[in-house]
Image (spheres, helix red, strand yellow):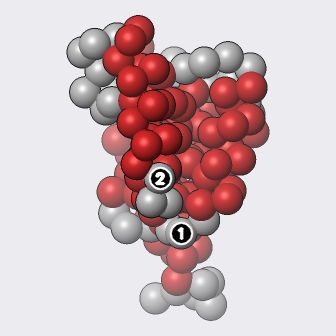
Amino acid sequence: MTLGWPMHACRAVSILLSLAVTGCATSGQEAQRTPAESRLRVAQVAEASGQTDVALSMYAAAVEQDPRDPVARARYAGVLARTGQMRQAEQVLNTGLASGTDSRLLVELGRLRLRSGQPDEARALFARVLERDSRNAGA
């Protein structure tokens, strides 16, 4: 029963409730998560369960709250790209790269270039990452 709520809102509530219940049984260290970390966790659960709209919303909120978080930016851009929002994904990555070079952002930008049919640019980005970290599995 949805009580007149849109289906995506019901799914979001069920995801949040399941995380809240799980959170009650976590260790003290996990209980001290920041709001951005909590948003990332909810976004990951939503993404894994196919709730892309919820994941996008939570990743966007995490990036807004902590614009310098490369993990949130890379994940947000990845979901944007997988949903066909290539320009937005590139904007999210380039904004993050403007404040410093981060391997996660470079790898995600390389993946974006591959999706866009630009393998030479992707290869150059992956090479930059591998110069710094030869064990980077993403690159």
The quadrant of the image that shows the C terminus is top left
Please tell me in which quadrant of the rendered image residue 82 appears.
bottom left
Residue 129 position in % (x across, y down): 42, 20
Tell me the element at label 1: loop
Q: Tell me the amino acid under the disc marked 2.
A: Gln
Crowding at dot 2, Cα within 10 Å, few <14 / some 14-19 / many 20+, comes out as: few
In the displayed structure image, the side of residue 1 where residue 61 appears, left or right: right
Tell me the element at label 2: loop
Q: For marks 1 and 2, give the one nearer the viewer.
A: 2
Residue closest to the eye, 32 or 79: 79
Residue appearing at x 45%, y 31% in the figure? 124
Question: What mark, if any, has residue 118 been given in the picture?
Answer: 2
Is residue 15 visible from the viewing direction of this image?
Answer: no
- Mark 1 lies on residue: 84
Please tell me in which quadrant of the rendered image residue 56 appears.
bottom right
Is residue 74 visible from the viewing direction of this image?
Answer: yes
Crowding at dot 1, Cα within 10 Å, few <14 / some 14-19 / many 20+, comes out as: few
Residue appearing at x 58%, y 73% in the figure? 9
Figure check: 56 above or below 67: below
Residue appearing at x 28%, y 13% in the figure? 134
Residue appearing at x 62%, y 90% in the figure? 4
Q: Tell me the amino acid under the disc marked 1.
A: Gly
Figure check: 131 above or below 61: above
